[in-house]
Amino acid sequence: MSFSVPKKLQTEIEELISHYPEKRSASLMILHVLQDHYGYLSDAAIEWLAAKLDLQPINILELVTFYPMFRQEPIGKHHIKVCRTLSCALQGSGKLKEHFCRKLHLDPLVHGPQTTEDGKFTVEFVECLASCHTAPVLMCNEELHEKVGETEADLLLDTMSPS
Amino acid sequence: MAKAETKKNLESEPVVDTLTVTVDGKAVEVPKTMPDPMDGRPIPTTMIQACKLAGAEVPHFCYHPKLPVAGNCRMCLVEFGTLAMDKNRKPIVDAEGQPVVRKMPRPAIACATPVSPNMEIYTQSEGTVEMRRAVMEFLLINHPLDCPICDQAGECRLQEYSVDHGQGASRFVEQKVHKPKQVDLGPRIMLDDERCILCSRCIRFTRDIAGDDALGFVDRGSHSTLAHYPNRPFDNNYTLNTVDICPVGALTSKDFRFQMRVWFLKESSSICSGCATGCNITVGSRENRIYRFTPRENDAVNSSWMCDAGRLDYKWVGREDRLKNVQVRNNDGVLVPSDWSRALGEIADILREVPEDSVALIASARLSNEELYLLNLLAGKLGAVTDSIPRKGDKDALLVHADKNPNMNGAIATGISTKRPGSKLKLIAKGIKSGALKTLIVFGENLSACEMDDELLSTLEHLIVCDILPNETTASADYLLPGCSHLEKRGTFINAKGRVQKFMRAAEQPGDSRPEWEFLLELLKRIDGTNGVASIEGLFNQMAADVPALDGVSWGDLGETGVSIEI
């Protein structure tokens, strides 16, 4: 397996394991760390973690496929997560996501995350981002953007892809 | 013997406290604890176990008495009542001083709820019946109705409970959830995820019994899917047990799938002959063709399981090249077809005249006790040296035994072999070489594997061979008698732990072949004119009286699961 985990990450993972009476309990926390580091959870990463925790890879795959925020494929450089829960939906998040798709030449009807051909953007719907009073909202990577209309959306895209 | 066993059980099992519960108005005393299916430690008796003891069936899918409890199918929901307590946790009593039982406002799953003193369980109440109907309706929402082409049809829990607890018509008008079909889970297992009701029996079996944590649910939610990890096939030696315990047709055996509708199969109780464990099996056959082996429950031997290798070890029975005719070597040295009467007559004439110490007899430990007993009687009359051939192979911690003979203990008990099987083979080979041994009787073995090739065997005056498939030794025989596989006759084996177990006949033998015990009785009769027993039951009982190890066990004592003896 060509998969290797850098020393610093190893230390972080060992530290996480030490928090729990059983190694297995650290599975979720380590998956987050691995995804943050590599961008997604490859088969190799899943198998590495299973071995690390004395588990079978199917035990880890069960977790990865259950939680929507774990991904098994790489995503774009900028990850646009549009909230679709009630308040945002009422404030037009559907149209907002459609707008992003059109601008980025993605299919607005496709379910689930979509990535542009150049690998720059991934657009998807997510559930509540806990900012209903400023709906519609989205998160771009780790940053929350509030009251996003089409103008704000265009501005956001422009700042991320200077032409 | 049966008595001795009961006594032993009483000694080994400590007296367990009991409590009384009422199931559908019938009071029943149940043990407070029952052994955990995994490690045997006492754990509280559950409602489903109490109901079973009371003779009331609680329908269930995910519960299996040999597996850890998961409690996910909800089919065993029952209404129940417990002792009413006052605020000081003291039982409330009625005017006559009897404790008051109050029905709980919520039902509970019978498989995971411990019983308590004076508990009342209502398996037939209106609420219980309605819950079953509702659970069935939910389970059938996404279940494909492909019963006409489903292998499980006829032995499907979902079908059976639909008849018992389901409703006649579906109210479901939406689109069913679609999931993967024809999933190649491993070399012997095919999975249809749409039929799966997510009971997790297979996951628990393979993790906790087979020790291979290979299966799991991915995409949990409305698309929950049973899966193995990609590129890690489900391939341990116990995978086919998951097909047995799958309550629906999701897991199917690649070997059996689409071969036969199960209701056409004749079921016969038998024993697996793959190794000395002697797993109890049910043989499914139709019109003389064997279609499958399935494990038959016997807690003294194999619990409810068997290994895949043993399960698929039946195809040779129907092989085209089975020995079907009695053959005798003529004056030109060619084996020509003959008949039983002539061959046994000639063999009897030869054996009546042989001088003592000139005969050797090698009998396979795959023969039944009855046959080995008769062969040992014959050897005694002839003053013959006898032995069996050991077979060693792989073993594991669950069921597979290193001794690949199903009945070596039988060969030892009847006197055919010493405690060191095969220890006289060298002596026999030497005797043939020196010319001291002139007659060799071989039952069910190929001697080329133990340095007695056809060149050596051709120096014998008489070579009498019985077998079921052709090999080097049968080719050298002067008299070749076609025998039967254990699936084509009745008899008993003694397994590695000293369990005497009987097997019943599942199929007709091919051609002119005959069960060995049957023609051996005839041969003995021809040699010294004695009249003996004529049935397998009588023969077993006679053997049990003669063979000290069997200690007077009778055929009747054996029952379905056998009797343990000291070995």
Image (cartoon, coloured by chain):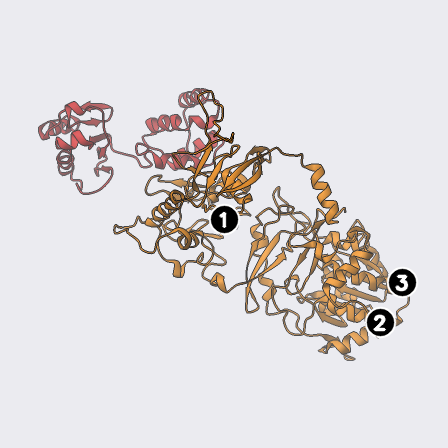
Q: CA distance from mark 3 to mark 2?
A: 17 Å
Q: State the mark number for residue B245.
A: 1
Q: State the mark number for residue B357.
A: 3
Q: In the displayed structure, does residue B355 sit left or right of residue B393?
A: right
Three-letter amino acid code of the residue under disc 2? Ile
Residue position for label 2: B527
Of marks 1 and 3, the one in the foreground? 1
Residue A55 in sight from this viewpoint: yes
Give above or below for A154 relative to B147: above
| Quadrant of the frame with the N terminus of chain A | top left
Pointer 1 local density, CA inside 10 Å: few below 14, some 14–19, many at least 20: some
Residue B207 in sight from this viewpoint: no
| Quadrant of the frame with the C terminus of chain A | top left
The image quarter containing residue B44 is: top right
Q: Does mark 3 fall on the same chain as mark 1?
A: yes
**Outermost residue to the bottom:** B331
Chain drawn red in the picture: A
